[in-house]
Image (cartoon, grey):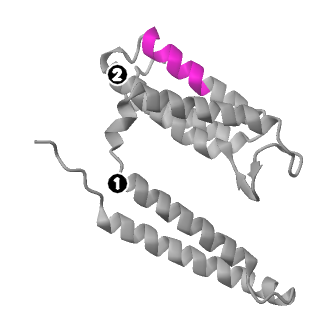
Amino acid sequence: MAKKLAFDRGLFAVVLALTGLGLVMVYSASAALARDHARAVNPFFVKQVLVACVGIAGMWILMHADYRNLRRPAVVYGLLGTAIGLLVLVLFGRELNSVNRWLFVAGISIQPSEFAKLALVAFLAYQLDRKPDQVNQVPVLLPCGLVATVMVGLVLLQPYMGTAVLLFSTAALLLFLGGLAWRW
């Protein structure tokens, strides 16, 4: 019989509590500014509440999704292709403060490098799970290194050094945890 997937209710409660605390902090930090501009509604708080609701709804949906679908090549390569496509697209987007880090869609700003972090972890986990005993060989190291290098390079073109270092460090850490020899 298949095992029913369950989520951690305690962790969910902690996320809700931290989100609520964050909303209180946004409200307290922006209430005076909204009052100074004679606004009846605090636009910063309202925007943050909407984004928090979307995030919690997305989290709720993903909590009930089967994580084993991440083993399917179509899902992994779909995430990877979308992430790389967005990283390329942002280079041709509108500049903000002399950098191209955000895509603006219907008044919402999206930072593709955040999606790239998730896609890189999913791809590396897929590669390491598929061939666990070949971590130190070219069939695993070449695609992992190539994908990580492409993503880091695209993020550096934005320029966004902090996320580039984080992507590189994440890739290195996952490979070492997957069994990569210390000589590398």
User: Of all residues shown, which one is farthest toward the front?
Assistant: 106
Q: Nearer the viewer, residue 71 or 8?
A: 71
Q: Residue at x 40, y 70 (%)?
A: 14
Q: Nearer the viewer, residue 179 or 93?
A: 93
User: Of all residues shown, which one is farthest toward the left?
Assistant: 1
Based on the displayed image, in which of its 4 quarters is residue 168 positioned?
top right
Above or below for 20 versus 83 = below
Q: Residue at x 78, y 33 (%)?
A: 157
Q: Nearer the viewer, residue 61 or 88?
A: 61
Label 1: state its secondary structure. Answer: loop
Magenta segment boundaries in residue numbering: 138-148
**From this viewpoint, is residue 177 visible?**
yes
Above or below for 118 versus 23 = above
Based on the displayed image, in which of its 4 quarters is residue 81 positioned?
top right
Mark in front: 2 vs 1? 1
Q: Circle 2 sits on which residue?
A: 130
- From the image, which quarter does the N terminus lie in? top left
Q: What whole-number distance in Å separates the C-alpha atoms at marks 2 and 1?
A: 24 Å
Q: Circle 1 sits on which residue?
A: 64
Q: Residue at x 73, y 54 (%)?
A: 109
Across and down, in percent, residue 55 comes to 53, 61
Label 2: state its secondary structure. Answer: helix
Residue 61 in the figure: left or right of residue 81: left
